[in-house]
Image (tube, grey):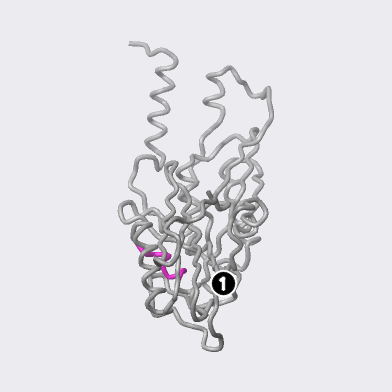
Amino acid sequence: MQLKHHDQTKVSQTQHSAQTPLGKETEYDQVYSPDILFPIERMGNRQTINISDELPFHGKDVWTCYELSWLNSKGKPQVGIAYFSFCAESPFMVESKSFKLYLNSFNHVAFEGVQVLKKVMQHDLSEVTGAAVSIEICDVDSEITTRFKNAPQAICLDHLDIDDFQYQPLASLLSLDAAEGQTTELLCSHLLRTNCPVTGQPDWGSIYIQYSGRKINHANLLRYIVSFRQCQDFHEHCVERIFMDLLKHCQCESLSVYARYTRRGGLDINPYRATKNLSASPVSFRTSRQ
């Protein structure tokens, strides 16, 4: 029996999908893996809509990555928002799941600077698509400051130049600043990363900690936040754990912990826990990765 043209296309796409990472069990924490990028030829689909070699248009495919993370040379996690621009004239595009897995393969790789990371990605993506790719990597906190005027004005810890990191939750990292007395502060970090206990998929968030009491040591607080990087637990449980550890080890008189996670499947989860002398409801706002 002869298949109709659209049926032939469907069979071809099914066979093609079998070669991609789609529908397969996925390991998210892997080493740098440029070979995982899966190219999809543009011309096959274009021929079905009567487009030949000479294109009747020009344009760009603009991708935004809200979950880009890598390490600096000291092992400190770095995060950024990356904008990728692929020209419509490139012979290949990138299958989306393979692109996501490729970006996650940088999570535990150290680079001397963001420009080195950018150069590596430009090489890999240009190689797989057959044309030059434009990449811009922006600082998460700067994006919040410039684009989201209703975001709280917090002291960001992420620019502290520190090392000696653990990647499993360690409450003993928390300490008070012996040289300082009582204070009230709103602190934030965009380096919170936890992992779904069901799928193993990384979850990325910004965490806001407001407290009154003796001054918390900022460097050790950042080390503590980073220590959740390989923790497998639900968003809500992670926030409750952070709240309880801070309450116990830092003797806060008042405390709120508010995590704003990036969305997955169209949902972002934002747990908030506070001592009973503070409001039970958080201020609603978005971060630059939401």
Q: Residues within 10 Å of mark 1 (few under 14, many from 20)?
A: few
Q: Position of residue 212 (x, y in %)?
A: 50, 74
**Could you say which quadrant of the image residue 232 lies in?**
bottom left
- The residue type indicated by label 1 comes to Ser
Q: Residue at image x 62%, y 47%?
A: 83
Q: Residue furthest left?
A: 198
Q: Which residues are magenta?
A: 225-232
Q: Residue at image x 54%, y 51%?
A: 285
Could you tell me what secondary structure mostly forms the magenta stretch? loop
Q: Position of residue 96 (x, y in %)?
A: 48, 41
Q: Which residue is mark 1?
A: 73
Q: Residue at image x 46%, y 54%?
A: 261
Q: Residue furthest front?
A: 277
Q: Position of residue 10 (x, y in %)?
A: 40, 23
Asked if the magenta segment contains residue 231, the reply would be yes
Residue 172 left/right relative to 198: right
Give the total number of marks visible in the rendering.
1
Asked if the magenta segment contains residue 162, the reply would be no
